[in-house]
Image: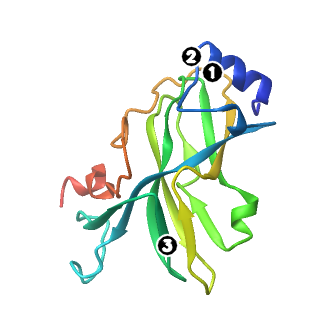
Amino acid sequence: MILSDKTIKKMLATNELVIDPIDDLQIQPASVDMRLGNDFLKVDENSLPVMTLNEEVSYEEFKGSEIIIPPHSFLLATTKEYINLPDNLTAFVEGRSSIGRMGLFIQNAGWVDPGFKGQITLELYNANRLPIKLEAGRRICQLVFALMDAAAEYPYQGKYQGQKNTVGTKVFKDPENKNR
């Protein structure tokens, strides 16, 4: 069941769901808009000949109130908000239609597990032929919350738990890589 604005407000008021900071403008009929943070990562393309799933990836970090994404470029960003999901609630990350119409694809693998705590790292891709300028603090994406039929037996405790600012891939820490 997808949560309504009424239920989202109730859960926020009781701290069952935490989104910090938040203001009323962000709460939509069936979602909460998330704002762009001021921390960004770009793959350090000069440090590696190829990226693999087995080795750590190097990034260049940028902080600031705005950033320009060149055409056909990829960038990691973060939400301004820190969230804390209860063990019976999951969330889907969706781009805002108004921004998607500019050619900016926003993703985070699309899913936030129950029990997750932290800022959400977003994958941004400019599919347009023109650069896109983004400003920190602007609404960039939305979370759609779904109530689960029961609390998760094993809520999220993974390698991104508690993350703050933008966090690059940690796929090299996957269990498949332990015997390599």
Q: Nearer the viewer, residue 112 or 19?
A: 19
SS state under label 3? strand
**Gap in angstroms between the C-alphas marked 2 and 3:** 36 Å
| Residue 15, numbered label | 2
Q: Quadrant of the N terminus?
A: top right
Residue for point 53% across, 32% down: 21
Type of amino acid under label 3: Ile
On screen, 142 above or below 4?
below
Residue located beneath label 1 in the image: 12
Q: Nearer the viewer, residue 49 or 180?
A: 49
Q: Quadrant of the C terminus?
A: bottom left
**Gap in angstroms between the C-alphas marked 3 and 1:** 33 Å
Count of marks overlaid on the render: 3
Q: Tags 3 and 1 in contact by the CB under 8 Å rule?
A: no
Colour approach in the figure: rainbow
Type of amino acid under label 2: Asn
Residue for point 31% across, 74% down: 51
Q: In the displayed orientation, state which residue is furthest to the left.
A: 180
| Residue 68, numbered label | 3
